[in-house]
Image: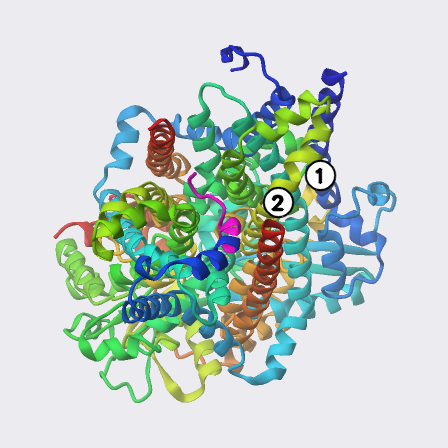
């Protein structure tokens, strides 16, 4: 009698545990199916319904019945500074797609550090498209077959529909008179930049500084390292991400100059009015944030068509206009001309020509024992 | 385990509760932690050793251990005081203060980190007072310590409080009759009784402090070799797709925590038994 | 004895403070100094950060505040947070009760080890608590590929968030019950059994009335932590707005979007939830004091 009841309770407990877990999985199994059921895919309301695990796997069937579902969901996994850009772009694309195909597309956004976002996709976050800070992060997805090796040829201009560069944000009136990279290593200057180990943007900062020093010192690597050592000696806080650094500079009022993406610098200026000025150095680096369709996920979820259209739309005049409005440098000449006051021309290094591509740059500078570690650990 | 027990059990339910406990413990805690070990096994022993003893990692242990240690010590002293005051004295608003002690459990660590940073940054409420004195809190090891004091306080207060309640008045009474001062009574009579819970509280606060991430990254400044904590290095390794290196460092942290907790629990049982038999 | 029952304490507080004779108490001056130091410390360490959150959340007035907490994304984050708590807390409670029963009512070898293993999640870095589930269920994990094939989503979806939360809040109920049940011994239960009561009945009629307030206190703490967990959840969540964002994650997103005021507003919402929880705890302690003295 006792044994029997104890067995029953035991099995009840085990079942309860797994039922709870599995029913929670069930509802998230089929994001597409869930939303195809509810035709009205208004921006956010529908999303939360499919996220709550209460309706245990009730929407299982309807998934594969129609060839062209009325609505479709797309997940764009991106990095931190593109939040505002894609918020505007997604609306524009959804309208365009509705007009073209009659299909309602709901685009989910996920933002975070570029590297950790790539890692999440690698670990199973089912992104249809990735729009990250560096080609290196997308390259890391090719090994497991998520994205085909030659992804960078899939779209125009190295699959980078917009570009950016690294500029300086200084306090109003530029009290410390910071004009160029050389000023950053002077005594008494505090420089704010995120940590290159954890932030994609910070790697661009680092390489731009490296490139400048290399030109000044005539390719003497010891001198270049010395320059970076002095520069990082002037850094009082190394935040983990670009947004963290901006907060430190803008809200905590620490530092004299922030090394930032051009778009981040403009955005901070827009949010905080006249407290800041943007300084364009004599030399910087061409940052090409790349985009790619995650082949494996898109094929599995049947979203390839819309995913490709989504990324292609970035290259249209509408897409380019939105990029420019969000302070990314457009590729399209006509849009670039329109915004040429906003984006001064300057000498730009490129990652492929001047640093031998991302894999090379990553290995030399940012991997364990690379030049960045040397700057911090030696001396 | 069941076979260890000689005498016949009177109470029912050992098998089922034990079975369920072990099953649940395995599913939620042990199997996931085993995954950590399996992943680390991808490294050879020399690689493992190299990873966990490289210069930057060692520096981060130093930062993590020292700030946790210091924060836990502060919490032991002030946690005891707070518990003492809450148990023994009456004052207005006591219930509220008692409730507030649990806040650090409930507040998301990131919110705590952001709030503490905005208080202690050079332009914050307290930071702006300390800055002219040349004391910097945010973005220094001191800032990390402040965050860890916040995180660890309830652990000490909540372990000391009940023991303080249960202390009998008799011994104090005897000491007082023999003419001992309050301070002397405290030191000779009360403190020995309070040592075990203080150690437990210390260990819990300390091991929580070593692992803390969310509240610390905002206030620490994350300077390599200076204010870089070990959990941040784990994240850094993950960002570089170095899974096995990340798990290797994680494993070191885990072993430190486990050893500490095991030591404390054994100590606790041992003193309990001694107290009961004496 | 360790980590014992703060709840049990409250009842005695009242009595102790009343009956404590003069020669066993510090002088008035010393008392005031000690109380002042303690209050200053709590004020500095706990109250000040809370005040900051409230002050920041009203920096731009009521309207921004109301807007922030009624945002659909905030509401869906709230819903997810509550869902997670509703699943994780009862499961941990069930475990806590079972483990406490096994540990306190019986003798067996390896008890210290078992208790330590139960404590372990306290000492595990939140980063690691999230990461272990990725190592297990992630696409490159040990059983992740199998799950992917069968289309079970665990990490970057609600189940992963629930699991990570369960891990982090794992010890709370057990930690609360073990010392309490230890002090109560086994006599009551043994008497009930010798009178012919059966297992479940013994637990519900004899044990539970003795531990119910301690149990509730554990549940409340567990719940508070479950709703507030950030680090571990951040690792296993896909950070998709309106889908896999809990309240703490939503706060971080807002913060990263330069919406500082809104982010603190949502944080204050979470703080309000915690405060409600703590008020309930206060009521429980009050009731417990009554049930003790009757």
Q: Answer few, some or many: residues within 10 Å of disc 2's Cα (few below 14, many 20 plus, some between 14 and 19).
A: many
Classify C21 as above or below B162.
below
In the picture, the disc for residue A20 is 1
Q: Residue at x 55, y 69 (%)?
A: C268
Closer to us: B53 or C212: C212
For the question of whether residue A291 can be seen, the reply is yes
For the question of whether residue A141 can be seen, the reply is no
Which secondary structure, mark 1? helix
Question: Which portion, as a residue range, is magenta?
Answer: C1-10
Closer to us: B79 or A22: B79
Where does the image place residue A174, in percent across and percent down from the top left?
28, 85
Residue A126 falls inside the magenta stretch: no
Classify C116 as above or below A136.
above
Q: Is residue B16 left or right of residue A272?
A: right
Q: Residue at x 66, y 41 (%)?
A: C209
Residue that carries the numbered disc 2 in the rendered image: C162
Where does the image place residue B185, in percent across and percent down from the top left?
24, 51
């Amino acid at each position: 009698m006792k044994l029997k009841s104890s067995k029953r309770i035991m099995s009840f407990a085990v079942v309860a545990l797994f039922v709870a877990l599995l029913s929670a999985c069930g509802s998230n199994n089929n994001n597409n199916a869930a939303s195809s059921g509810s035709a009205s895919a208004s921006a956010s309301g529908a999303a939360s319904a499919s996220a709550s695990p209460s309706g245990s796997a009730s929407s299982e069937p309807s998934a594969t019945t129609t060839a062209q579902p009325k609505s479709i969901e797309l997940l764009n996994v991106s990095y931190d500074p593109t939040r505002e850009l894609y918020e505007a772009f997604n609306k524009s694309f959804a309208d365009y797609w509705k007009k073209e195909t009659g299909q309602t597309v709901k685009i989910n956004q996920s933002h975070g550090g570029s590297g950790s976002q790539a890692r999440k996709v690698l670990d199973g976050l089912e992104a249809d498209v990735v729009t990250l800070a560096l080609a290196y992060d997308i390259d890391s997805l090719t090994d497991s077959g998520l994205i085909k090796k030659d992804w960078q040829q899939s779209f125009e201009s190295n699959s980078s529909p917009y570009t950016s560069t690294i500029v300086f944000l200084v306090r109003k009136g530029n009290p410390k008179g910071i004009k160029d990279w050389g000023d950053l290593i002077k005594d008494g200057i505090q420089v704010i930049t995120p940590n290159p180990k954890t932030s994609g943007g910070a790697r661009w900062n680092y390489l731009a500084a490296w490139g400048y020093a290399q030109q000044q010192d005539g390719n003497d690597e010891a001198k270049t390292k010395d320059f970076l050592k002095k520069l990082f000696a002037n850094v009082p806080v190394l935040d983990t991400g670009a947004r963290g650094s901006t907060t430190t500079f803008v809200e905590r009022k620490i530092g004299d100059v922030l090394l930032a993406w051009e778009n981040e610098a403009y955005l901070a200026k827009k949010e905080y009015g006249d407290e800041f000025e943007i300084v364009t150095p004599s030399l910087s680096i061409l940052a090409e944030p790349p985009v790619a369709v995650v082949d494996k996920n898109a094929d599995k979820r049947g979203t390839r068509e819309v995913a490709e259209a989504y990324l292609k739309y970035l290259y249209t005049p509408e897409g380019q206009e939105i990029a420019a409005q969000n302070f990314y440098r457009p590729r399209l000449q006509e849009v670039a001309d329109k915004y040429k006051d906003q984006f001064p021309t300057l000498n730009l290094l490129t990652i492929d020509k001047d640093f031998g591509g991302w894999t090379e740059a990553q290995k030399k500078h940012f991997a364990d024992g690379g030049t960045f570690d040397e700057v911090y650990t030696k001396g | 385990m069941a076979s260890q027990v000689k005498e016949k059990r009177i109470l029912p339910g050992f098998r089922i509760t034990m079975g369920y406990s072990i099953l649940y413990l395995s599913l939620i805690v042990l199997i996931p932690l085993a995954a950590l070990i399996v992943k680390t096994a991808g490294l050879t022993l020399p690689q493992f050793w190299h990873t966990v003893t490289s210069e930057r990692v060692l520096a981060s242990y130093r930062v993590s251990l020292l700030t946790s240690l210091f924060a836990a010590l502060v919490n032991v002293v002030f946690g005891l005081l707070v518990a003492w005051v809450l148990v023994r004295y009456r004052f207005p608003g006591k219930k509220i203060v008692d409730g507030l002690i649990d806040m650090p459990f409930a507040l998301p660590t990131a919110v705590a980190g952001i709030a503490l940073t905005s208080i202690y940054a050079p332009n914050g409420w307290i930071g702006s007072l300390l800055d002219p004195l040349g004391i910097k809190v945010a973005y220094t090891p001191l800032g990390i310590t402040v965050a860890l004091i916040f995180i660890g306080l309830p652990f000490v207060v909540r372990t000391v409080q009940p023991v303080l309640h249960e202390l009998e008045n008799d011994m104090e009474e005897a000491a007082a009759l023999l003419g001992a001062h309050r301070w002397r009574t405290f030191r000779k009579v009360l403190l020995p009784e309070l040592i075990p819970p203080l150690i437990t509280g210390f260990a819990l606060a300390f091991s929580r402090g070593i692992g803390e991430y969310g509240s610390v990254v905002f206030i620490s400044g994350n300077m390599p070799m200076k204010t870089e904590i070990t959990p941040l290095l784990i994240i850094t390794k993950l960002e570089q797709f170095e899974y096995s290196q990340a798990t290797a460092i994680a494993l070191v942290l885990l072993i430190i925590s486990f050893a500490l907790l095991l030591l404390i629990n054994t100590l606790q049982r041992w003193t309990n038994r001694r107290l009961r038999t004496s | 004895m360790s980590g014992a029952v703060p709840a049990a304490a409250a009842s005695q507080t009242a009595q102790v403070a009343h009956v404590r004779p003069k020669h066993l108490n510090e002088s008035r001056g010393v008392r005031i100094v000690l109380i002042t130091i303690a209050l200053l410390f709590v004020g500095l360490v706990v109250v000040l950060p809370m005040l900051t959150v409230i002050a920041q959340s009203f920096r731009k007035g009521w309207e921004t505040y109301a807007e922030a907490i009624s945002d659909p994304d905030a509401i869906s984050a709230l819903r997810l947070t509550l869902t997670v708590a509703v699943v994780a807390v009862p499961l941990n409670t069930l475990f806590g009760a079972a483990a406490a029963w096994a540990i306190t009512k019986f003798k067996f070898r390896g008890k210290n080890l078992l208790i330590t293993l139960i404590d372990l999640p306290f000492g595990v870095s939140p980063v690691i608590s999230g990461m272990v589930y990725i190592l297990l269920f992630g696409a490159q994990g040990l059983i992740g590929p199998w799950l992917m094939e069968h289309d079970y989503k665990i990490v970057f979806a609600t189940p992963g968030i629930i699991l990570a939360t369960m891990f982090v809040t794992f010890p709370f109920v057990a930690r609360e019950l073990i010392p309490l049940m230890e002090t109560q011994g086994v006599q009551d239960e043994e008497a009930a059994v010798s009178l012919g009561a059966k297992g479940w009945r013994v637990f519900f009629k004899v044990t539970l009335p003795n531990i119910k307030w301690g149990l509730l206190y554990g549940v409340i703490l567990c719940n508070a932590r479950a709703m507030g967990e950030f680090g571990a959840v951040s690792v296993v969540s896909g950070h998709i707005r309106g889908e896999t964002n809990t309240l703490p994650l939503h706060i971080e997103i807002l913060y990263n979007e330069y919406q500082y005021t809104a982010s603190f507003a949502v944080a204050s919402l979470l703080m309000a939830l915690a405060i409600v929880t703590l008020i309930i705890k206060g009521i429980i302690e009050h009731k417990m004091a009554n049930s003790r003295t009757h």
